[in-house]
Structures are given as structure tokens and as C-alpha cells.
Amino acid sequence: MKTLHLVLKRKWWDMIESLEKPEEYRDFTPHWFSRLVDCRIPKTADLATRYFGYDGRNPNIENFQEDLDGEWILFKRFDAVCFHRGYTNTTMSFEFKGTSLGKGNPAWGAPDKVLFIIKLGKLIRKNV
């Protein structure tokens, strides 16, 4: 089973545990890009510059969307998402329903910018 592991602060853990929050957000950064996206662009391409600018801080969402539409990049597929409450052994796992790019719900912790949105399905397992 291919599982995506994510660490959550208590507030977001509680919202996901109560099923109030059906998605989790991660910033559009080189780090999360490498964890959530598969590239079909030749390795010679300078992806950091193409998607994040020369300084790595200015995301170019248009280039990303263009390559996604052209199937040069794809979102990685997982079977499950395992959340860790902080850096503890307390975990809960959900079905993975996909990743997208967009603006999330501010009530669920999304800042007003484009993010990776990780969609959750049913609760699979809880380990307290």
C-alpha cells in the first residue's frame, strides 16, 4: 500500500478526525512538488526555475497548469493518507481521493493563495 504521511498540528488533526475537514493543504513549494508530483519532462529541464522562479519563492502556477494539462506532469497516486498528530505515534489513515491545485477553504486553514489540495475519503484506521 502506497501511503502519504503528513504531520498535523492539533487544531487541524481535530478537524480532520471529526470529519469536519475533508481535505488537507500543502504550499506550492519545491518540497511539496517533489512529494506530490511525477514529472515526465526530461531531467535536463530546470523545473525549479520553470515552476518557482529563479529565487524559488515566486510560484508560476500558469506553467504548472500548462504542463499538467499537457500531461508532462501528473499528480502522484497514493492508496492512503496517514496523518500524524505532531511528531507522535498517534495516527489516523484515510482513503486518498486525489490531489489538485487550487485555493482551499480559509475556515480549514488555507491561506489566500494557490495550494496543493489533498482530498480525503473514508477513515481507514486510527491508532491512538
Image (spheres, rainbow, N blue to C red):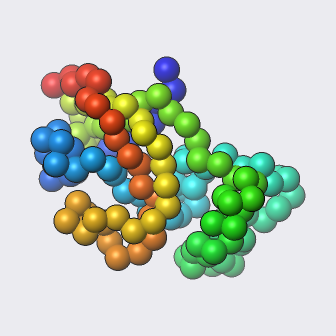
Horizontal side, residue 78 vs residue 120: left or right? right
Residue 29 position within the rendered picture, expressed as x and y whole percent measured from the top left: 53, 64
Number of dots carrying numbers: 0
**Residue farthest front in this picture:** 69
- The quarter of the picture where the C terminus appears is top left
Vertical relation: 61 (above or below) 100:
below
Quarter holding residue 90: top left
Instruction: Look at 28% across and 31% down and name the residue there.
Output: 122
On the rendered structure, is 90 left or right of 68?
A: left
Which residue is depicted at the point 41% across and 49% down? 118
Give me the residue at 73% from left, 53% from top: 71
Q: Examine the image and state in which quarter residue 52 appears.
A: bottom right
The location of residue 41, given as percent across then percent down, is 80, 54
Residue 67 picture quarter: bottom right
Q: Nearer the viewer, residue 117 or 54?
A: 117
- Residue 113 seen in the figure: yes
Which residue appears at 33% of the width and 51% of the height?
A: 24
Q: Is residue 21 left or right of residue 110?
A: left
Is 18 situated above or below 47? Answer: above
Image location (x, y in percent) of residue 102: 45, 65
Q: Is residue 52 visible?
A: no
Tell me if 22 is positioned left or right of 80 in this view: left
Percent x, y of residue 8? 27, 47
Front-lying residue, 5 or 99:
99
